[in-house]
Image (cartoon, coloured by chain):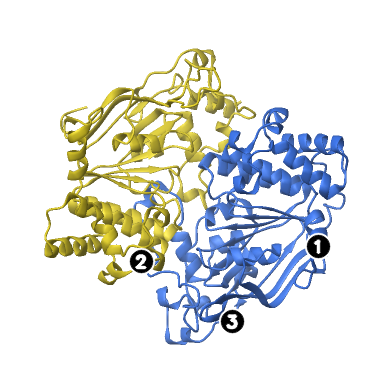
Chain colours: A blue, B yellow
């Protein structure tokens, strides 16, 4: 255990090519009264050490199921039908219960949307953090308490000794999320999974949590898998983005490339309707139609019914193919379309 | 405030009356303090506030569900706060003020068909024959852009966006003059959010309904509001015309909100300050009583801010602002930058 709360991990200066997480051809099925339906289809992405990738999409697009598959906590009725998930060379798809315990105490941390529901409401948050440290690092009570206080301070919680003694109801949503992040990074993980972790927070707090995740990336070399329905929040934190639609990745690549030159009409539409800009907002643009419900996606291109660039050929399934700047896109017409991006910061 | 206003909220206070007296400590549990604002007919006003700012309490107070301990609320010139019994019942039955709930899945009865949900208020008011009742339901569905076939379905069979429309249909069927929407879009993705905001604007344009939109997210409602009131710890710290307030916020808290909004590109959000320039690090202290409520988080606070609560004064943006340093903080930032 490091003596400094946020001492850089040895080896975090290793080259970025250092592959941490590989998701290959992942398909997740959901059991429904109508039979098994593929809710996530053929999703692939790589995440290197210290990198952050954002999975963005509407509810039902498969981003959360993908993230839960990586965490090994798929909801009841959901299962991995095909594909591989490897974390640091370990096959997570075929991992047994003991294996998961080890992985979760050494390599993986996670934070979710509603921090209060993951904490015991009647115990001081510091004790809960110290208990996690004690169990995961097999340290003594005194050492765990000291480490917990260090971590609370590292999360920029003001007066950590005071916060340590407080129960969840005495803390704000933003403070609770900081406690959850402290718990998630307590075991010095390589990968932090944040599933809509900033969604329910107030604007100023959301920004503070994103800034904290940035800092953890820089100081710990932590890789982040960030799931959000808000493309702008993803753009604030992630160097890579995967745009999900109806269970598939429709566009994936460097965030700057995807945002400044979207290759998929859906990405362009997201940018158009997306957060921001008082004057531009007055237009209140919408994407025509609705995201298909589970099992109701059309054959061929799943976005076609809502796409202004649709042609007859879109009735066949588009492959994920190469676009400029290393971006991959699932659109037959991508090369011939002039799609509008956003000006970069 | 003039008589032409539809809703006038004048200097209302709301205290939390604690039922449990376990601790003898008398806490200053002001949920709202001296809150004043008004809504003109056909106007869309945004009330922005974070968790605990009192924005939902404000909505409930306007609806008469909570009684203010001081101040007055007038609707169409008539006092509606502090009334009870028959007058309150008749006001509610008329349904001129309607609330659109935050969470459609939890506020809609899962066992009722959409038609029955929409007609609930009409049925309580009574006096309609079956044909007129059906016509009103059909018109409400039409107004919110829902297909007539939705009438026979149950909430569980609808998408999130459709459910939110049902909650709006349930309100507009009463032919209100004022809609109060509590976080109408916070659970929706960008496209559906814009769809609902568009719908609210269309309802205003078509029916002349005034609308109060309560939200924690200033950026997401920026495109639809005419005026904005920013609530912080039970006080309105700034209020003004929307475009002006977004361009040149007079209160450091409004500026912090604008700077914190995530943005894809600088070009689309013309706000030039970063949150780091506006945040004060490392404080979670509650404000001193008697001082400015934002003081513990304010980078620009001076001694006076701890001692004296700032009054609401005219702002350079044409609205009002409650800040001792309203005319100075920006200049002090520019001085820092020049150094």
Horizontal placement of B72 versus B301: left or right?
left
Residue B110 vertical placement versus B313 (above, below): below
Residue beneath the point at 70% across and 65% down = A70
The subunit carrying tag 3 is: A
Q: Whole-percent x and y of residue A312?
A: 43, 87
Q: Whole-percent x and y of residue A259?
A: 54, 60
Horizontal placement of B302 versus B247: left or right?
right
Q: Residues within 10 Å of mark 2 (few under 14, many from 20)?
A: some
Q: Whole-percent x and y of residue A136?
A: 82, 50
The subunit carrying tag 1 is: A
Q: Whole-percent x and y of residue B262?
A: 53, 48
Return the mark for residue A319: 3
Residue beneath the point at 46% across and 52% down = A275
Return the mark for residue A85: none
- Identify the mark nearer the N-term, 3 or 1: 1
Labels 2, 3: front one: 2
Instruction: Give the spatial CA distance, label 3 vs label 1.
Output: 27 Å
Q: Is residue B332 visible?
A: yes
Depth check: give the residue in front, A290 or A125.
A125
Work out which quarter of the rendered image holds the N terminus of chain A and state it.
Answer: top right
Labels 1, 2: front one: 2
Secondary structure of the residue carrying tag 3 is loop
Return the mark for residue B154: 2
Secondary structure of the residue carrying tag 1 is loop
Q: Are marks 3 and 1 on the same chain?
A: yes
List the residue tagged with mark 1.
A18
Q: Quadrant location of residue B199? A: bottom left
Depth check: give the residue in front, B105 or B185.
B105
Secondary structure of the residue carrying tag 2 is loop
Instruction: Give the spatial CA distance, label 2 vs label 3.
Output: 38 Å
Q: Is residue A330 visible?
A: no
């Amino acid at each position: 255990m490091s003596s400094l709360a946020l001492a850089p991990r040895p080896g975090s200066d290793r080259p970025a090519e250092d592959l941490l997480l590989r998701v290959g051809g992942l398909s997740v099925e959901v059991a429904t009264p109508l039979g098994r339906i593929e809710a996530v289809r053929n999703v692939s992405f790589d995440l290197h050490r210290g990198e952050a990738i954002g999975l963005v999409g509407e509810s039902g697009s498969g981003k959360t199921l993908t993230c839960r598959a990586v965490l090994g906590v798929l909801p009841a009725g959901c299962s991995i039908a095909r594909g591989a998930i490897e974390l640091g060379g370990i096959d997570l798809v075929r991992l047994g219960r003991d294996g998961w315990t080890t992985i979760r105490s050494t390599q993986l941390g996670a934070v979710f949307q509603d921090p209060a529901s993951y904490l015991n409401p009647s115990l001081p948050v510091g004790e809960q953090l110290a208990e996690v440290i004690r169990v995961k690092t097999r340290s003594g009570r005194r050492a765990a308490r000291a480490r917990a206080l260090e971590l609370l301070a590292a999360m920029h919680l003001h007066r950590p000794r005071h916060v340590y003694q407080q129960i969840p109801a005495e803390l704000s949503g933003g403070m609770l999320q900081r406690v959850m992040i402290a718990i998630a990074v307590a075991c010095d993980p390589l990968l932090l999974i944040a599933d809509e972790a900033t969604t329910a927070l107030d604007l100023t707090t959301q920004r503070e949590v994103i800034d904290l995740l940035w800092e953890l990336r820089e100081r710990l070399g932590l890789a982040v898998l960030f799931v959000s329905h808000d493309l702008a929040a993803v753009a604030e934190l992630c160097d890579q983005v995967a745009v999900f639609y109806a269970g598939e990745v429709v566009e994936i690549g460097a965030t700057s490339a995807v945002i400044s030159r979207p290759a998929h009409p859906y990405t362009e539409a997201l940018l158009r309707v997306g957060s921001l800009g008082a004057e531009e907002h007055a237009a209140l643009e919408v994407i025509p139609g609705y995201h298909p419900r589970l099992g109701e996606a059309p054959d061929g291109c799943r976005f076609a019914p809502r796409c202004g660039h649709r042609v007859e050929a879109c009735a066949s399934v588009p492959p994920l193919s190469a676009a400029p700047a290393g971006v991959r896109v699932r659109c037959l017409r991508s090369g011939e379309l002039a799609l509008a991006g956003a000006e970069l910061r | 405030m003039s008589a032409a206003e539809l809703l006038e909220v004048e200097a209302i206070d709301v205290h939390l009356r604690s039922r449990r007296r376990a601790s003898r400590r008398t806490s200053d549990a002001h949920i709202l303090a001296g809150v004043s604002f008004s809504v003109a007919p056909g106007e869309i006003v945004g009330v922005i506030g974070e968790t605990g700012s009192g924005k939902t309490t404000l909505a409930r107070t306007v609806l008469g569900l909570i009684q203010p301990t001081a101040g007055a609320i007038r609707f169409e010139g008539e006092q509606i706060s502090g009334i009870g019994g028959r007058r309150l019942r008749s006001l509610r039955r008329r349904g001129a003020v309607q609330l659109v709930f935050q969470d459609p899945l939890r506020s809609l009865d899962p066992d009722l068909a959409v038609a029955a949900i929409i007609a609930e208020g009409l049925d309580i008011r009574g006096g309609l024959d079956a044909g007129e009742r059906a016509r009103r339901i059909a018109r409400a569905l039409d107004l919110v852009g829902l297909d007539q076939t939705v009438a026979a379905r149950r909430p569980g069979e609808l998408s999130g966006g459709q459910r939110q429309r049902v909650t709006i249909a349930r309100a507009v069927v009463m032919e209100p003059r004022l809609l109060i929407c509590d976080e109408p879009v916070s659970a929706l993705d960008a496209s559906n959010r814009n769809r609902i905001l568009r719908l609210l604007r269309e309802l205003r344009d078509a029916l002349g309904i005034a609308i109060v939109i309560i939200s924690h997210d200033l950026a997401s409602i920026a495109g639809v509001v005419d005026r904005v009131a920013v609530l912080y710890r039970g006080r309105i710290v700034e209020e003004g015309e929307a475009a002006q307030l977004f361009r040149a916020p007079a209160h450091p808290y409004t500026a912090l909100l604008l700077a914190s909004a995530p943005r894809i590109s600088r070009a689309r959000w013309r706000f030039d300050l970063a949150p780091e320039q506006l945040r004060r690090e490392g404080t979670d202290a509650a404000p001193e009583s008697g001082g400015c409520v934002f003081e513990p988080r304010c980078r620009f606070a001076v001694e006076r801010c701890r001692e004296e609560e700032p009054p609401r004064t005219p702002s350079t943006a044409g609205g009002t602002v409650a800040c001792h340093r309203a005319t100075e903080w920006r200049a002090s930032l520019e001085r820092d930058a020049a150094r």
